[in-house]
Amino acid sequence: MPKRVIILGSTGSIGCSALDVAQHLGDECEVVGLAARSNWQPLHQQIKQFQPKVAVLSDPTAADQLNNQPGNNGTAIWAGEDAMVRMVQELDADFVLASIVGVAGLASTLAAVERGLTVGLANKESLVVAGSLMVDAARRSGAKLIPIDSEHSAIYQSLQSGRHEEIERLLLTGSGGPFRTWTTEQIANATLEDALKHPTWNMGPKITVDSATLMNKALEIIEAKWLFDVPPERIEVVIHPESIIHSMVAFCDGSIIAQMGQPDMRTPIQYALTHPHRHFRGGDRLDFSALGKMHFEPPDEKRFPALRLGHQVAERGGTAGAAFNAANEAANEQFRAGKIRFVRIAEIVEDVLNRHAFTAHPDLETLTAVDAWARQEVLQCSK
């Protein structure tokens, strides 16, 4: 039987890579559901190619445009904010890939976990904002959470070499972003064009700016705490500009297990889709004789204060993740809109985080309220 797959965020970079993997897997994978926010043109092309049972657009106007196009091949077009949740709850599926950026993907991801499905997590925010809710729901339903981010996928794979009680440290690697070698003064004058010049990965603008601030690593620290049940003080970030080692696990006997490979998001996506098995993928292989040297260095928390904030949020839990994530999303957007300077992103996020009304054991309604409050506060700080 083919694995029945729903892709949330199918028109984004991760979603498109997932569809490429699904096409490669052929009869082993059946795409039964696709979802996007408003980008109906590429979704229409995906419908024609994969013929899912349901396609969702959260923007009703975009859904109307899609409905009027020829070639939908009997695919039902659903619209509205709740349609993604409904699709996850009602379609016969085995695997849900959650790749909608930001808190917008939270409800549908939680619905998949509550249903007990295998969930490929490419949405950091699901665990950053609602880690306790996701983990508790997975324990109750038996859902399996398999990370898609290259770093967490690498840790997930490396953990197969030992038991949880044998873990000493998790080592998250990162390229260091475009400002790895920049001075504090240079970073203070960084432009959007500078921030979008990522040295390794081809990603969307929001995630690329997160990589420039190292907010992406801060979010990954929080995510790793929930995903692998490891205290934040045992989660470290290592700068590795070649991006060949995707992350590592240090065990209690001194052994360090690393997952290595070419920087290609299709590899962790396919691993999640075919887990616990591995399937052949074409493409370039590592050539160690040509690779030469690999470099490693500690991150500089003075130049990149996001890392310090990430550890603080992971340690505190509760609503801290929701305030942190929302403030970062909003500040990131303000920077990309030319409203604030690059260095103001981390400053504003820290200010909002420190002023939010902390709750230790929030429900989804409380998390949503904190998210909305934090975004409004960023707008006020940006004036």
Image: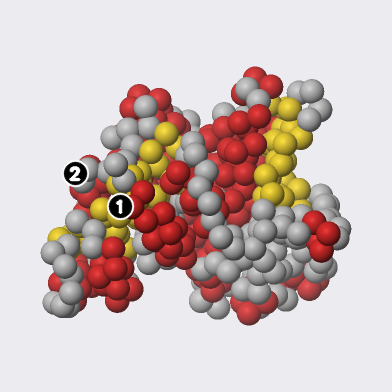
The residue under the point 81% across, 28% down is 254
Q: Nearer the viewer, mark 1 or mark 2?
A: 1
The residue under the point 77% across, 64% down is 180
**Left or right: 25 as drawn, with respect to 46:** right
Distance, label 1 to label 2, CA atoms, is 16 Å
The one of 357 and 227 positioned closer to us in this rendering: 227
Which circle marks residue 267 in the picture? none
Say whether residue 373 is visible: no
Q: The N terminus lies in which quarter of the figure?
A: top left
The spot of residue 155 in percent (x, y) is 62, 39
In which quarter of the view is residue 153 placed? top right
Give the amino acid type for the residue marked by disc 2 in the picture.
Glu
The spot of residue 172 in percent (x, y) is 68, 45
Give the amino acid type for the residue marked by disc 1 in the picture.
Glu
**Left or right: 216 as drawn, with respect to 370:** right
Say if mark 1 contacts mark 2, CB within 8 Å.
no
Q: Residue furthest top?
A: 165
The residue under the point 65% across, 25% down is 162
The residue under the point 82% across, 52% down is 296
Residue that label 2 marks:
90
The spot of residue 366 in percent (x, y) is 36, 40
The one of 44 and 296 positioned closer to us in this rendering: 44
Q: Is residue 303 above or below residue 308?
A: below
Residue that label 1 marks:
30
Q: Secondary structure at mark 2?
A: helix
Q: Secondary structure at mark 1?
A: strand
Q: Earlier in the sequence, mark 1 or mark 2?
A: 1
**Left or right: 29 as drawn, with respect to 222:** left
The spot of residue 205 in percent (x, y) is 53, 70
Mark 2 neighbour density, 10 Å: few (under 14) some (14–19) many (20 or more): few
Q: Is residue 31 above or below residue 290?
A: above
